[in-house]
Image (spheres, rainbow, N blue to C red):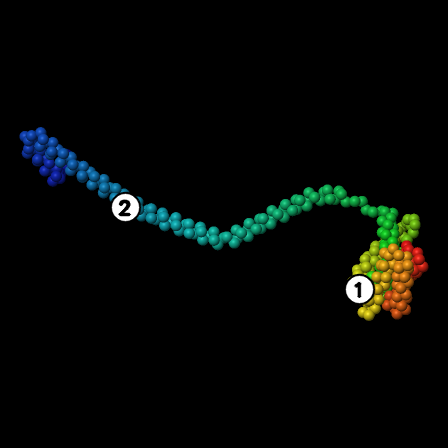
Amino acid sequence: MTRTRTRRPADRRAHGHLHGHGHASGAGGIGVRETYRAGRYDRRRERRMRRRHGRHGSVLPFVLGAFIAAAFVGGVIVYAVIKLIPYLVLAAVLLGVFVLLKRSFRSCSVDAGPAAASVPAPESGLQAWQRAKAEFDALRVEYTAHECDPMQVLRRPALSDVSVPSTARFVDAFAEAQSLDTDAHPGAPYDAAFTVAVAKARRAWQAALDAADRIRLSNVPTHERGSIERVLKLLTTARDSDSEHERLAAYARARSELDRLDRAGIVHLPRTARAAVDEASRGALPG
């Protein structure tokens, strides 16, 4: 069965025109053909435009849907990240602390070996006694220098006053250490007792010095502080003067003032300090 193609009006007009005017001149035939071809071109272009618009119209909803879905997913991700930021920061901090502790532990483990190897051997009883002996000799020299110098006694009268608690504790500790002092190593357990006594005396001496520096002349009546200052000036003049007469006169006046202060109970010079003043007042330079 043969399908008969129905001609469109434009085709019929073109066909009839061709058959009806077949005898037309060559120029007229060319014009008819051009018209026919232009019509076919217009129809084809119209069909292509319809197909193109139809395709775009079907794709556009999918594009819009994909865009909306992507925006929704992105919003969900951003919201989740914002909510998780505190937990992420906390996790980062904990991780950093863990790393630091781990490194510190490793460094301590590495350093522990050499440190443990460099620990000195324990001190023997003889070595401890020798060290304590040297410390006590130095303490005795320091204490004796104070007791023999009247100017030091006047500047720190509390250091020679056993009514001051810190001075009394030092005197007792010094006497205890001195009673255990020997020229040769006494052996155990006396060497250990001497070492302990010397350490106690050294601490008591430092405490007495600190207390005397704080007290100074605060225990001396106000009207007598000037007398002590005058005695210090007289002793300084006697020590530094090149004139024998001036030096002896200064020592004599200082001795007289010290006697008065001693009788009044203001300042009591130790016997060694008083002996130094007496010797200097007789014309000999103080030792």
Answer few, some or many: residues within 10 Å of disc 1's Cα (few below 14, many 20 plus, some between 14 and 19).
some
Q: Residue drawn 93% across and 57% down?
A: 283
Front residue (pair 70, 189): 189
Return the x and y of residue 132 as percentages of the image width and height: 86, 51
Extreme residue in the top direction: 26
Extreme residue in the right direction: 282
Figure check: 56 above or below 16: below
Q: What residue would you read off at disc 1?
A: 215
Element at badge 1?
Answer: helix
- In which quadrant is the N terminus drawn? top left
Return the x and y of residue 146 as percentages of the image width and height: 86, 58
- In which quadrant is the C terminus drawn? bottom right
In the rendering, which numbered label is found on residue 266? none
Element at badge 2?
Answer: helix
Q: What residue would you read off at disc 2?
A: 57
Front residue (pair 201, 149): 149
Return the x and y of residue 268 as percentages of the image width and height: 88, 65
Amino acid on which the number 1 mark rests in the picture:
Ile
Q: Where, by quadrant of the figure, is residue 35 drawn?
A: top left
Q: Is residue 266 left or right of residue 97?
A: right
Return the x and y of residue 223 as percentages of the image width and height: 82, 70
Answer few, some or many: residues within 10 Å of disc 2's Cα (few below 14, many 20 plus, some between 14 and 19).
few
| Residue 256 visible, this orientation | yes
Q: Where, by quadrant of the figure, is residue 203 drawn?
A: bottom right
Front residue (pair 13, 248): 248
Figure check: 117 above or below 238: above
